[in-house]
Image (cartoon, helix red, strand yellow):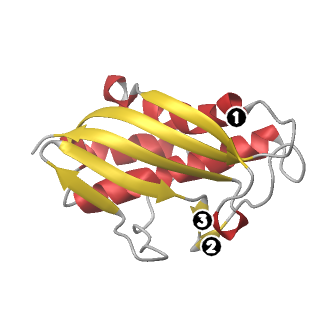
């Protein structure tokens, strides 16, 4: 099943990168029982932040949705690292928390988050359906446009 997940990713035009190392004093994921917590992931591509700026000012909604997709790809990369390379151990994506760097007055954070939600659901199928939050922020680390963390139920 893990190979099937990566095949679906490739069919959508994505390849899982090597999971990024943390940028400060934290770990990229923790596991407690059957729950995998993945730290906030930025829209990294090719080893750098691909999309920066405030959504609704410097960044338009389609570009911000692409940033959310990249965050979701990086969540899956961290899950793969946490699960010893076996993404088939994901039983359910429980929740995604999305933080969108938003210009004053911007109120379409939920539409930006669809980039991540759609990708996760398309790649994982039914286990990819999840609860979520989409929150506007004044700024994010490294001027990233989007940051997303995740909580997953896994096979122990």
How far apart are labels 1 and 3 at the CA level?
22 Å
Q: Secondary structure at mark 2?
A: strand
Left or right? Give the position of 106 relative to 17: right
Tell whether label 3 touches label 2 (CB within 8 Å): yes
Identify the disc placed on residue 109: 1
Left or right? Give the position of 31 relative to 145: left
How far apart are labels 2 and 3 at the CA level?
6 Å
Left or right? Give the position of 139 relative to 75: right
Residue 145 in the image, given as x and y percentages of width and height? 71, 54
Give the foreground label among 1 and 3: 1
Tell whether label 3 touches label 1 (CB within 8 Å): no
Left or right? Give the position of 66 relative to 83: right
Location of the C terminus by quadrant is top left
Location of the N terminus by quadrant is top left
Q: Secondary structure at mark 1?
A: helix
Task: In the rendered view, tell whether residue 147 sits above or below residue 116.
Answer: below
Give the foreground label among 1 and 2: 1
Other residues around mark 1 within 10 Å, as few (<14) / some (14–19) / many (≥20): many
Q: Which residue is mark 2?
A: 48
């Amino acid at each position: 099943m893990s190979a099937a997940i990566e095949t679906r990713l490739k069919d959508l035009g994505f390849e899982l990168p090597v999971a990024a190392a943390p940028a400060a004093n934290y770990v990229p994921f923790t596991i407690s029982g059957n729950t995998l917590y993945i730290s906030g992931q930025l829209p990294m591509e090719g080893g750098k932040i691909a999309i920066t700026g405030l959504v609704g000012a410097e960044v338009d909604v389609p570009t911000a949705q692409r940033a959310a997709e990249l965050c979701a790809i990086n969540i899956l990369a961290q899950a793969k690292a946490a699960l010893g390379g076996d993404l088939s151990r994901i039983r359910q994506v429980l929740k995604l928390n999305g933080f969108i760097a938003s210009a004053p007055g911007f109120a379409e954070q939920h539409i930006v988050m669809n980039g991540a939600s759609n990708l996760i659901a398309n790649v994982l199928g039914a286990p990819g359906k999840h609860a979520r939050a989409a929150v506007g922020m004044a700024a994010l680390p490294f001027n990233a446009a989007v940051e997303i963390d995740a909580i997953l139920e896994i096979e122990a």
